[in-house]
Image (cartoon, rainbow, N blue to C red):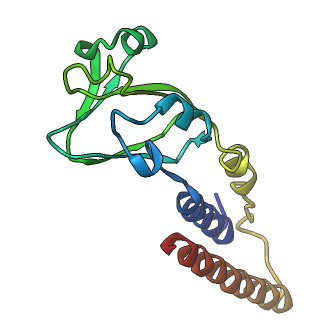
Amino acid sequence: MMSRSGLLLVVALIFVEQCWAAQHVVGGAQGWDESTDFSSWASAQTFKVGDQLVFKYSSGLHSVVELGSESAYKSCDLGTALNSMNTGKDVVKLDKSGTRYFACGTLGHCDQGMKLKITTVSSSSSSGTTSSSTTSTTDSPSSSKSPASISGASGSFASFIVLLLALLGTSLIFCMF
């Protein structure tokens, strides 16, 4: 069984990792548009698990279609779409490592280069964090603790909580900006 402080640490790390996830506005300032060189834009980015792609465009003029394979991407085969979006501000969460393919669903736009291939890598903060923070200690029912060790543990726990709250507060401030 996990100790309370271990559980709080895991929860805090989840919040911090979500806060630090990047939002990539596809195409940068130009957005999801025919005039953007998406290959150059993507090559300048690092996409990590937990990040998000944000497709900004004029709704009705464009759409976003996720394709299932590289061959569909190369040939602009929109018939194999895994997902289709058309809100003008579509958000795609990068929830696992690997390569993903996107294209504009408007007739002819993919063939004109309005398509995107990205490779998502595992984030360094998600590897190993869980296993080291889930180490638990169990007390046998017959163990007894002296009053000094109980108050020392309570003091340590209280200090941990104060530190944890300070960390979360700082993380939330950074998330806002």
Q: Can residue 11 be seen in this view?
A: yes
Q: At x 39% / y 16%, what residue is drawn?
A: 73
Pinpoint residue 136: horizontal percent, then vertical percent.
72, 58
Determine whether 109 is above or below 57 in the image. Answer: above
Pinpoint residue 92: horizontal percent, then vertical percent.
38, 42
Q: Pick the quarter of the image with the N terminus.
A: bottom right
Pinpoint residue 50: horizontal percent, then vertical percent.
52, 47
| Horizontal relation, residue 14 to residue 151: left or right | left
Quadrant in the rendering for residue 27: top left
Between 58 and 168, the one lying in front of the other is 58
Between 11 and 124, the one lying in front of the other is 124
Q: At x 65% / y 44%, what residue is drawn?
A: 123
Q: At x 52% / y 35%, what residue is drawn?
A: 96
Determine whether 53 is above or below 17 in the image. Answer: above
Q: Can residue 119 be seen in this view?
A: no
Q: Which residue lies furthest to the front in this view?
A: 35
Pinpoint residue 149: horizontal percent, then vertical percent.
84, 85
Between 16 and 116, the one lying in front of the other is 116
Q: At x 20% / y 27%, what residue is drawn?
A: 106
Determine whether 34 is above or below 166 in the image. Answer: above
| Horizontal relation, residue 143 to residue 4: left or right | right
Give the number of callouts: 0
Q: Which residue lies furthest to the left in this view?
A: 60
Determine whether 88 is above or below 170 in the image. Answer: above
